[in-house]
Amino acid sequence: MRPGYGMFQQQTAKMRITPQLRKAITILKLSTPELMEVIHQEVTENPVLEIAGNTWDADYHTPTFFQVARRTDDNYDPLLHVTSNEVSLERHLKEQLGFIKKIPPPIRQTVLFMVGNLDRNGYLRSPLPEISEVCKIELSQVERALKILQSCEPCGVGARDLRECLLLQVQSMADSFPLVSLLIQNHLNDIANFHIHKLTTMLKVSTQEIQSAIDVIKGLNPRPGAAFHIEAVHYIIPEVIIEKAGEQLIVRLLQTASPRLSLNGYYERMVITTSDNNELTRFLSGKLHAAKFFLKCLEQRRRTIVRVVQAIVEEQNDFFWHGAVYLKPMTLKQIADKLGVHESTVSRATTGKYAQTPWGIFELKYFFPSGLQMDLGDSASSEHVKSKIKAWISDENPKKPYSDQKLADLMRGEGISISRRTITKYREELGISSSVRRKRI
């Protein structure tokens, strides 16, 4: 048969995503703070929609200090409503310089130039000769300006490298630590590689003296400016609560997660009872239809989230009764198949949503950990493995800490197949140092 081209008719079934369906999908996907913003926008733009009982207003999510201070409810915790009061490192330093009066104007301007050129960790990376040229000031005066900057808090600010940063902090201490200063000046690499024996031999001091000096260095701050670069506070608002009730686990929506909406009765009656087909009636009729659909989307969102959480509770029952060690591997597809919905629906219902549980507040995605194969064909969750790593390291001999390979061997002894590389990854995610750094003499 000769290959060729032709025209054929073929019927395909394709789901058309309407604007209404797209909006319903979007509302399900929203996190709780995002949903609050959308609700606020809808109420602002649609006169037919209103907050039920008028208990929530435009400033619901941003109470002022005075609104917080006036609350007298015994169960009200004002700390939950404190917002971040970020003060930049630059502002903090300029405020201190304002109290130092006897600084000649050219030097003060140079100090301010330096302040404006610190990196986010508080280091001055610009070479002093370059600053001298830019500020049109003698190098000796630049050095004087640097001393003024380095006298400010946080201690170590204005340093040009790690050694200078640590030395500035040691020099500010009431006690003298000559060995600490010596180690910082000449042996930071040896400390990082834990060459204790080399240091004791070279410096002719005891192991205990080296260890005590290292402990002092560990207490220093290598990034004095980092604390001033605070990200904006993001509040976690749980949408559902999972609580124990006798021998059962109950799932319910938290009413405080989002305000309840209702239809404005006056406008609704106006649309239903009027026979006029004027512009106002048509406008209100459209808004009434939009309001009803929005309420329907919100209700569908609530039902979907509750169904998904109930399915999660059924699958992860042991976790809610006994803790993270009992969290087992689970996929979105498992829950989707259980509920008879698409996997994407479960993904939207769990992304950015949080649940308050007997063990704390968790994002719903937390309950879908990946799995590691066990010898008997079962699987263990990454959280289960992490909890074991944490427990073993907390009980280890500090003089002979477990290496990552040893931890992998211990896991295999428990029937969990895991590589040393995966152990390293999980240990770092837990914020635990390597065995070399954990070792104590």
Image: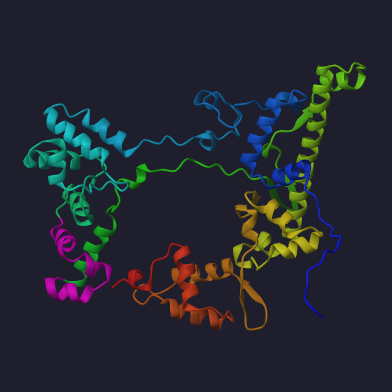
343 part of magenta stretch: no
Q: How is the image coloured?
A: rainbow
Tell me: 73 left or right of 251: left
Residue at 27% x, 71% y: name it.
193
Can residue 103 be seen by looking at this rendering? no
Tell me: 20 left or right of 71: right
Q: Considering the image in quadrants, where does the C terminus appear?
A: bottom left
Look at the picture and state if 75 lies above or below 208. Answer: above
List x then y, in percent, for residue 14.
81, 55
List x then y, in percent, for residue 51.
72, 27
Look at the picture and state if 293 lies above or below 371. Answer: above
Q: Nearer the viewer, residue 179 or 185?
A: 185
Q: Quadrant of residue 238?
A: top right
Q: Quadrant of residue 247?
A: bottom right
Q: Which residues are magenta?
A: 177-205
Look at the picture and state if 286 lies above or below 355. Answer: above
Can residue 14 be seen by looking at this rendering? yes
